[in-house]
Image (spheres, rainbow, N blue to C red):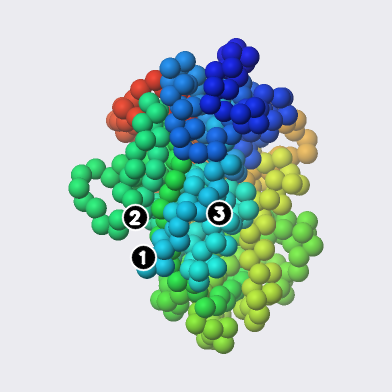
Amino acid sequence: MPDINRLETLFRSFLSDAQILSDPQSRAFYGRDWLKDFTPNPALVLLPNSSSEVREIIRLCAREKIAIVPSGGRTGLSGGAAATQGEVVVSLERMRKIHEINRIDRTVRCDAGVTLEQLQTAVASQDLYFPIDFSSRGTCQIGGNIATNAGGIRVIKYGNYRDSVLGLTVITGTGETLELNGSLFKNNSGYDFRNLFVGSEGTLGIIVEATLSLVSRPKDTVRALCGLDSMHQILPLLTYCRDAFSGLSAFEFMEQLPFQEVVSHRGLRNPLSQSYTAYVLIECEVDSIDHSDSVRQVLGEAYQKGMIADVVVSESYAQANELMNLRDLISETLSQHHTIHKNDISVPVPTIPQFLKELHETLGTIYPTFQVAVFGHVGDGNLHVNVLKPSGLTDQEFWKQCHEADHVIFKAVQKYRGSISAEHGVGLLKRDFLNYTRSEAEIALMRGIKAVFDPHGILNPGKIFC
């Protein structure tokens, strides 16, 4: 642990006392993300007000060889924002200015500390729409979203964060400011460093500002909940919906267990007549709510063809929100009522049913006391695998078995040519499993790239790889 008093003296040369937090409560709060696997132990927390202050912080830390953990809303689930080794946490929560919303080219330029909900509300006031969305919208920050290339429920139509990022301003591990691509839609003048920083998890530089592309606001949204008797109904239904709905914006999958957990613990109404093996939440952007009749007709035909066992289609804004809550509240509900071990993985979409069958069979044989709850984004192959702690296990034994089970899960992922991290990043949680997704040559190239942008090794050290 560095000399905290000396550090505070150094940072006070350009930061106020209110921007430097050293009390145990603040260090514990800012030193972890939503994953509780790692014990926070930062030396200090710094709250810069501007990109120039971020630059000075990095330059001082580079000179003094002090490690930095960049911090956004800390809603990640891989330990990417965890500070466990006496690092300095640099939180961008005070940098929340939206600089410009441009209706001509449909872009927004904002600070990295702006929350997703703040951004969505601001662009909506200009009759524009930022389509990437997830349940942590009120807390997560744009910089952290970009640094992890977050996805969410509408990737099937709008892509991951990477697809909405036009330009970035970043500060590298030497304190150099890079303005990458601005607001250009086309720029083929050499390497695209902007995309290199998307998903880099704060290991190459700190994102301080972003320019994002926007779209027209959908006039209305219709949602439908489908009950399925078999996992093998998922892919035919996906193909059918893609062909039938030009405005298909979400196709979300839930196994029976996580669906029942939400209904039970949240006191929500199950809109279907009985329980099913799996559920699919469909969202379509339409010209008016009257189009719910056409959605109902198409899904009625899917029922007649045996693709689904039951279906309910929203008839109002309130009912559409009720249906989304059944999916949106799963992660929060599981975390509140269970000790869980989360895995965020992806496999090729056509392999999902067979992968799930093999995953449950393998885990059921090796770890018969584990309950496994799976849900996710079928349209892009992203599955969230949640292992629930059995009542008879201590936390310590549970985490030990989960670490062993991860090898089983990732071997299955590797077999299907998938990824150990779909949208949450690698962080600390999956660092030791990177070889299941990346070759030795790829990892060596990653190390080389980091050495260029962060030659002193001060930015989020130990994350992604050692």
Mark whose residue sits in front, 1 or 3: 1
Where is residue 189 shown, x and y percent of the image?
A: 20, 48
Which is more toward the observer, 96 or 240? 96
Counting from the top left corner in percent of width and height, residue 458 is at 45, 23
SS at mark 3?
helix
Amino acid carrying label 2: it is Ser
The answer to whether residue 79 is above or below residue 182 is above
> Do the residues under discs 1 and 2 have CB atoms within 8 angstroms?
yes
Quadrant of residue 71 in the image?
top right
Asked if the residue under mark 3 is in contact with the one under mark 1, i.e. CB atoms within 8 Å, the reply is no
Residue topped by disc 1: 105
- Asked which secondary structure carries label 2, the reply is loop
Corner quadrant of residue 133: bottom right
Alpha carbon of mark 1 to alpha carbon of mark 3: how far?
A: 20 Å
Give the camera-side residue of 240 and 203: 203
Q: Work out whether 37 lies above or below 425.
A: above
